[in-house]
Amino acid sequence: MNRLLAIARKELLQLRRDRLTLAMMVMLPVIQLLLFGYALNTDVRHLPTVVLDQDRSRASRDFVRSMESTGVFDIKGQVVDEAEAERALRSGRARVVLVAPAGYGTALARGRPARLQLLVDGSDPQTVASASSTAASLAAVRSAEVATRRLALQGMAAPPPAVSLEPSIWYNPDLRTAVFIVPGLVGVILTMTMVMLTAMAIARERERGTLEQLVVSPIRKLELVAGKILPYVLIGYIQMTLVLALGRAVFGVPLVGSLGLLYALASVFIAANLSLGLFFSTLAQTQQQAMQMSFFFLLPNILLSGFMFPWEAMPLPARLLSQLLPLTHFLRIVRGIVLKGATWTDLSGELYWMVGILCALVTLASVRFSKKVA
């Protein structure tokens, strides 16, 4: 135990002398949180839209105003023909074109089918889904209004809908992207910083020539690995606290569950990433190589863990591979506790996965470490 604490104290002293690393530990979470929190937003709004109004009736103008009032569409003006509409989409001046054909208002007034056309730039599928669903909802509402008005003129009441669906959205009723993204950023930022910092640990010892002191010491491999991990667990907690506090203050992210449970389970996740970083450091000869390995590992985490894309939508081989990533399980833990108030019983399966990954990584790092100087 004394030898393990000696290694941990030595690591803390080295960190205290490295002011650049200390500054990075504090500033990196802040910058990443603000950058991702504001930039990653799947709420599609303010789509530049132009109108090809061939009808020029009050009904067509009313529909255009209703589109603009949703906040999804920003009306940028009119086009005179289909060729100009195509140029607007091709140049990027517009992402959406509303076409109101001649006779739209007359057909609507007479109760006949009245058709509108929506041309959407399909280079971004998310834009297509948002624009199409919003416009279709507006058309359904307008159709119901016309039908109700015609029945009222005939002295009849509108019949109730045959099927009624009343959605109730839990945990994020406003569907704010930040509420989904910010808790996940806790895991992403910890993965980035913990793996990168510890990946350079053994490589830094080798470059500075201090590895020889560890070679001649009576320290066991497991003690060396644990001693180098221990100081960074505290740093991980500091970063985690910083992200959660800023997420609450800046983005209004709630904290529904137990903070103590979150910190207890986070210790396993932090230790797993630190162990992985140490494993990378046993493979690398220089700090630059260690950093390259860390960045290479970061991209699969973001793509496969469910941070940005639905985990259930991935093919089976990708889902199986993602189960080997600590971030996959920690995202379920942090989002479950922060947003849903999940308990230990709800999250025990994810913890078992992380403990297994941690044990495997500590074993690999210990076996790979060689008390020999190349």
Image (cartoon, helix red, strand yellow):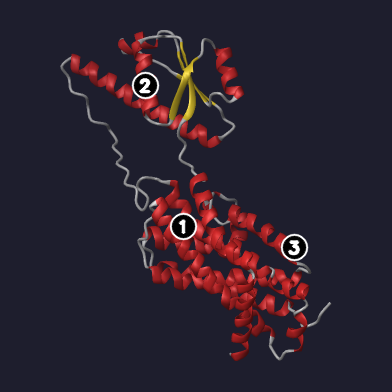
Picture mark count: 3
Mark closer to the observer (1, 3): 3
**Residue at the farthest right position:** 374
Type of the residue with mark 2: Arg
Estimate how packed mark 1 is, as few (under 14), some (14 to 19) or many (20 or more) residues with alpha carbons within 10 Å.
many
Quadrant position of residue 335? bottom left
Give the residue at mark 3: 288
Amino acid at dot 1: Pro
Contact between labelled residues 3 and 1, with CB atoms less than 8 Å apart: no
Looking at the image, which is closer to me, 345 or 207? Answer: 207
Q: To which quarter of the image does residue 369 belong?
A: bottom right
Q: Position of residue 100 (x, y in %)?
A: 44, 14
Left or right: 4, with 149 as reference point: right
Which residue matches tag 1?
183
Q: Disc 3 or 2, which lies upstream in sequence?
A: 2
Q: Between residues 88 and 140, which one lies in front from this camera angle?
A: 88
Q: Is residue 203 above or below residue 168?
A: below
Q: Nearer the viewer, residue 213 or 80?
A: 213
Picture disc at residue 65: 2
Mark positioned earlier in the residue sequence (1 or 2) = 2
Q: Quadrant of the N terminus?
A: bottom right
Viewer can see residue 370: no
Q: Position of residue 358 (x, y in %)?
A: 59, 73
